């Protein structure tokens, strides 16, 4: 109120504020109709692809141009629900999905949907190989077979390449499993000596 002037101020106007407003003194009335136009939703920052080791937690994060927007997260086109495996958080314009203790079955495409806008990101398990043994000195008699094994941790299975000095050794002597790589010498020769 400012003297004879009366004002109605609607702060932070929302769609539900759209209606007819009236003001009256005695038997006199004034009316006004308020029309509210919604700002179109835009994804300012989409979630990024994630490559993490099994057992770790992954957080997908997306940001919209406005807050108070209901969003959904999907994995391989299935709606994700809140629980021990998936935690969903919304803080203003920022929305997060945390996937806890990832396993191979958690891999795939994740979608973030806000009204008619969507963004996609993928989750893949990946852990750099860690060799579980140090240098070894092996001795074999000439003419006998020898198999050298190097155990490792990696996901997915590592691709192994064996070298003697700077020379790449032939793949037909290499066997790599999900937990180790081995190189076989069928008949040891003096020329096989080296590192």
Image (cartoon, rainbow, N blue to C red):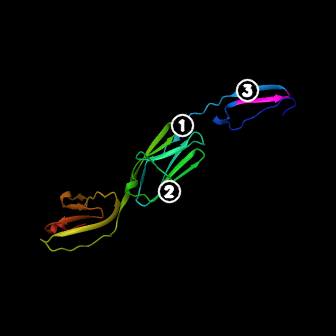
Residue drawn at point x = 50 percent, y = 45 percent:
72
At numbered mark 1, what does the secondary structure look like: helix, strand or loop? loop
Position of the C terminus, as image quadrant, is bottom left
Q: CA distance from mark 2 to mark 1?
A: 28 Å
The span picked out in magenta is: 20-26
**Extreme residue toward the right, this view:** 3
Please give the residue where the numbered disc 1 appears in the rendered image: 42
Camera-nearest residue between 28 and 65:
28
- The image position of residue 65, as x and y in percent, is 57, 39
Q: Please report whichever mark, 2 or 1, sits nearer to the chain's N-terminal start.
A: 1
Q: Earlier in the sequence, mark 1 or mark 3?
A: 3
**Residue drawn 62% across the image and 30% down it:** 37
Instruction: Residue 83: tell me if it is visible.
Output: yes
Looking at the image, which residue is at 28% across and 71% down? 136
Residue 46: x and y in percent read 49, 43
Q: Which mark is residue 83?
A: 2
> Which tag is nearer the camera, tag 2 or tag 1?
2
**Disc 2 on helix, strand or loop?**
loop
Instruction: Characterize the local packing of mark 1: few (<14), some (14-19) or many (20 or more) Cα atoms within 10 angstroms.
Output: some
Q: Position of residue 17 (x, y in %)?
A: 68, 35
Q: Indicate the quadrant where residue 169 lies.
A: bottom left
Circle on res. 32: 3
Taking the image as shown, residue 54 lies to the left or right of residue 42, namely: left
């Amino acid at each position: 109120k400012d003297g004879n002037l009366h004002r109605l101020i609607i702060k932070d106007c929302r769609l539900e504020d759209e209606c007819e407003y009236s003001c009256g003194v005695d038997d006199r009335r004034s009316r006004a109709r308020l029309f509210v136009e919604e700002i179109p939703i835009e994804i300012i920052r989409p979630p990024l692809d994630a490559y993490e080791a099994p057992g770790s937690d992954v957080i997908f994060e997306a940001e919209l141009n406005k807050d108070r927007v209901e969003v959904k997260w999907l994995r391989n086109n299935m709606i994700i629900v809140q629980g021990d495996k998936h935690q969903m958080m919304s803080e203003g314009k920022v929305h997060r999905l945390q996937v806890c203790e990832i396993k191979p079955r958690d891999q795939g495409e994740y979608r973030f949907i806000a009204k008619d806008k969507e963004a996609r990101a993928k989750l893949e398990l990946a852990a750099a190989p860690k060799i579980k043994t140090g240098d070894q000195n092996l001795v074999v008699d000439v003419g006998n077979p020898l198999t050298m094994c190097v155990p490792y941790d990696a996901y997915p299975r590592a691709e192994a390449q064996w070298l003697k000095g700077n020379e790449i050794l032939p793949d037909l002597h290499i066997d790599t499993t999900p937990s180790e790589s081995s190189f076989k010498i069928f008949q040891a020769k003096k020329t096989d000596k080296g590192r």
